[in-house]
Image (spheres, grey):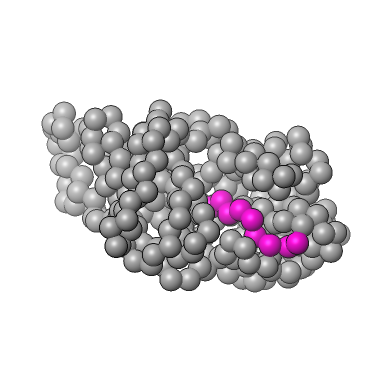
Amino acid sequence: MPDIDRREFLTRFGIGTAGIVAAGSVLSLASCSSPTKKEAAKLAALRVSSDIYKTDLVQRFAFSIFDRNSQVASEGSIPIMLTSPSGKKQKFGNVHVREKGISGNGIYSVMAILNEAGSWTMNTEFRGQQLELSFSVTENNIAPGLGTICPNGITPTTSAPLDATILCTRFKGDCGLHSHSVPELLETKKPFIVIFATPARCQTTYCGPVLELTRNVADKHTSIPVIHVEIYKDETSNNLLDAVNAWGLQTEPWLFGITEDGKIDSRLDGAFDQSEVEEVFGRLKG
């Protein structure tokens, strides 16, 4: 089998490039015929975070490790080192896999200061193998950035669905997270959470699970409202909801924590587990 590029690699894993972004060199997978033990052990680290940008604020960098058999291999704890374009290093020891609520599909995430635009490198050791992942930090963010004011465009609700023909593709139109719009909650001057996910049409395997686990966490923290917004206007077209365009989202799923003064406090995207969602709720509760 010839070498395959990142897009095909993701496709074989059943993970679309819209939700999980791979970075680094072309991945060389060995021949399908009679693979050696060394070839069978081939591993690759793939970036999960889709919108990493230059900022002095601490932001999330997430990735997962896959094997040549299209399986998520992430497990246990690993050391992580990030190297900036100028050569500055950030070391993280014993980073444990995040898999609460997404067992078998875990990821690794660290909170790092990525304050240089350009090509960064992540190095780690997993199952005795040295893995390296190159990823880009852009000069500017695409989705709403940390510390910025939350977009105040109206989001679809049960009473005012706007341009959404279905409010939730996971729970037959209503997952219980469509009672309020973003402008309405901004007026309360209290923290809240917004999750963008389209379970039935997600280009990754994560939209459904992360929506469900977010609902589970929300049930335990009723003082912090949660808004769910689908991605598309209906179940068949590729027309994005006006709210999705207003937030500038180009990938899915996304979860944002909004403070009482209407600023973006936390951002989770691509894939995340219940422990990360719980941490967002915890930050907002103070």
Q: Is residue 195 left or right of residue 32?
A: right
State the residue at coordinates (76%, 35%): 220
Is residue 258 visible to us here?
yes
- In this rendered view, identify the residue nearer to me: 250 or 32: 250
Specify whether 125 is left or right of 229. Answer: left
Q: Which residue is nearer to you in this view: 12 or 254?
A: 254
**Picture coordinates of residue 211, whole percent (x, y):** 64, 44
User: Magenta stretch: dominant SS?
Assistant: strand
Q: In the image, what residue occupies the spot 81% across and 44% down?
A: 223
Give the extent of the magenta segment. Answer: 261-269
Q: Which residue is painted at 76% across and 39% down in the image?
A: 221
Q: Position of residue 68 (x, y in %)?
A: 27, 38
Q: On the picture, is 195 further left or further right than 185?
A: left
Q: Is residue 248 above or below residue 251?
A: below
Residue that lies at the very extreme toward the front in this rendered image:
88
Look at the image and tell me whether residue 72 can be seen.
Answer: no
Percent x, y of residue 242: 67, 70
Query: Is 170 part of what is drawn in magenta?
Result: no
Residue depicted at x 63% and y 67%:
148
- Total residue callouts: 0
For residue 139, which quarter of the picture?
A: bottom left
Q: Nearer the viewer, residue 43 or 236?
A: 43
Quarter of the figure with the C terminus: top right
- Residue 263 drawn in magenta: yes
The percent coordinates of residue 132 (x first, y second) are 27, 47
Which image quadrant for residue 244?
bottom right
